[in-house]
Image (tube, helix red, strand yellow):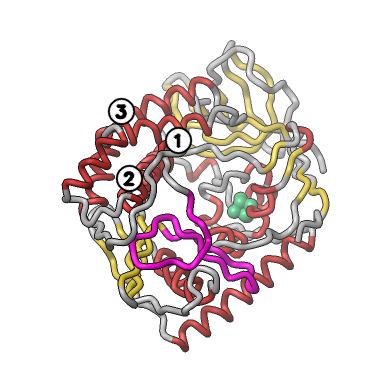
């Protein structure tokens, strides 16, 4: 499953993509991504030799997504430490001891924030300025993240089981999950694998007491139908994983834990499990086929493309989804493809449409932008502006704007 399906010309300078083969195993999210748009799945995981052989195309992270990662990561550390210490309840004195040993909630959150910022360090799509702004935004929300972690934790119930070593590993995390039969107790970060079907999932918290099994997944974003599907996959994986669940115990409850409430998800019965099994097998066969073809299908739609990290590499997006200038309101961020025309001022350039006529005045933040007159460019994240001294629409470069030079393919 590792044969490379070949190279793909994206039409953007220095961005020839060398596609990678299908993965050894699929997860719920990778399979969903490959099903919703095979091209996006492939471009995000391809290697780009002209960009330094790095694996995958980096995304531009949003502050809300990073904030969610901080909360989830901090919660993971705390839940794991409490499960290792066989804490009976987050309100127990033993829970307070665990938090003290971790250095307090704020310290756990700050560590997670530092991890998230460190992961952005080599991201070629982030300027120093944008990196700094993201750091400032996240640091201003430490108290909020701490409060969220405490809220999730306050509703978490633990099942007592054997106590494990709580010696912290690097990054504040305690023991790693070992794939073996699970006994009674609370088990954080459980990896479930269906080897034959090539599917896996990682459950946030799995609790076993007597012959009852409960699965909880923490969700830091808004509610979504996909969360129910994901939890039902976990129930299916639990049934299929002969290593972790050799006795074939059934799942009693599935819970999606949101910030403000817990939502119970129906546990699939035997017939529904059989349907799920068939659905996943079909999706995997389709996704494998798309990847192995070497020319994965693009599925442009507003929903798919709006936040697509590789839309500048996707001809279908620019042909069908990228907005028309006439549809963009003042103050909105928008993407634009055009040709750089004459310089209009020290920090302004004309952008020409396909007929070679000016249609947008581009305002840059520097007199030496990364393009030259005659270049065809794709610009992501311009801000629509206006100037009382001209009737021309204005597109202003912001700290988050990216410019990519188009080459003929
Ligand atoms: S821009 Fe849309 S169609 Fe193109 S790869 Fe991204 S999601 Fe797929």
Q: Residue 140 carries which label?
A: 3
Could you tell me residue 364's position as x and y percent? Answer: 55, 20
The quarter of the displayed image where residue 345 is located: top right
Whether residue 19 is situated above or below residue 169 in the rendered picture: below
Q: Which of marks 1 and 2 is nearer the N terminus?
A: 2
Residue plotted at (63% across, 53% down): 40
**Residues packed near mark 2 inside 10 Å, few (<14), some (14 to 19) or many (20 plus):** many
Q: Is mark 3 on a helix, strand or loop?
A: loop
- Asked if residue 347 lies left or right of residue 298, the reply is left
* Residue closer to the observer: 80 or 218: 80
In the picture as drawn, the residue positioned furthest to the bottom comes out as 271
Q: Earlier in the sequence, mark 1 or mark 3?
A: 3
Q: Name the residue under label 1.
A: 171
- Asked if residue 98 lies left or right of residue 387, the reply is left
**Residues packed near mark 1 inside 10 Å, few (<14), some (14 to 19) or many (20 plus):** few
- Residue 188 part of the magenta segment: yes
Q: Name the residue under label 2.
A: 78
Whether residue 201 is situated above or below residue 126 in the rendered picture: below
């Amino acid at each position: 499953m590792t044969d490379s399906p070949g190279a793909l010309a994206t039409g953007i300078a220095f961005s020839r993509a060398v596609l990678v083969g299908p993965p050894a195993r699929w997860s719920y999210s990778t399979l969903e991504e490959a099903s919703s748009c095979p091209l996006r799945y492939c471009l995000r995981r391809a290697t780009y030799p002209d960009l330094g052989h790095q694996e995958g195309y980096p995304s531009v992270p949003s502050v809300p997504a990073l904030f969610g990662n901080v909360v989830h990561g901090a919660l993971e550390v705390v839940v794991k430490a409490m499960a290792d210490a066989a804490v009976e309840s987050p309100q127990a004195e033993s829970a307070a001891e665990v938090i003290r040993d971790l250095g307090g909630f704020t310290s756990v959150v700050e560590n997670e924030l530092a991890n998230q910022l460190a992961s952005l360090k080599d991201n070629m799509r982030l300027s120093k300025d944008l990196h700094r702004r993201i750091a400032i935004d996240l640091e201003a929300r430490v108290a909020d993240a701490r409060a969220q972690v405490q809220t999730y934790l306050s509703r978490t119930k633990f099942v007592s089981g054997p106590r494990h070593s709580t010696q912290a590993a690097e990054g504040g995390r305690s023991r790693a999950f070992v794939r073996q039969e699970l006994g009674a107790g609370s088990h954080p970060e459980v990896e479930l694998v269906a080897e034959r079907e090539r599917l896996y999932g990682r459950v946030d918290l799995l609790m076993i007491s007597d012959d009852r099994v409960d699965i909880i997944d923490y969700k830091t974003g808004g509610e979504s139908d996909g969360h129910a599907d994901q939890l039902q996959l976990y129930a299916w994986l639990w049934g299929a994983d002969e290593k972790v669940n050799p006795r074939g115990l059934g799942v009693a409850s599935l819970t999606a834990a949101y910030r403000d409430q817990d939502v119970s998800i129906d546990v699939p019965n035997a017939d529904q499990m059989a349907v799920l099994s068939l659905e996943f097998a079909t999706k995997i066969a389709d996704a494998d086929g798309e990847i192995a073809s070497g020319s994965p299908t693009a599925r442009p739609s507003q929903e798919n493309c709006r936040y697509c990290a590789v839309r500048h590499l996707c001809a279908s997006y620019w042909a069908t989804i990228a907005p028309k200038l006439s549809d963009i309101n003042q103050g909105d961020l928008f993407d634009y493809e055009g040709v750089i025309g004459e310089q209009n001022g020290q920090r302004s350039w004309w952008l020409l449409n396909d007929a070679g006529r000016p249609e947008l005045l581009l305002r840059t933040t520097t007199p030496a932008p990364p393009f030259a007159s005659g270049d065809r460019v794709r610009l992501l994240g311009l801000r629509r502006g206006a100037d009382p001294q001209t009737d021309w629409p204005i597109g202003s470069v912001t700290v988050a704007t990216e410019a990519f030079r188009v080459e003929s393919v």
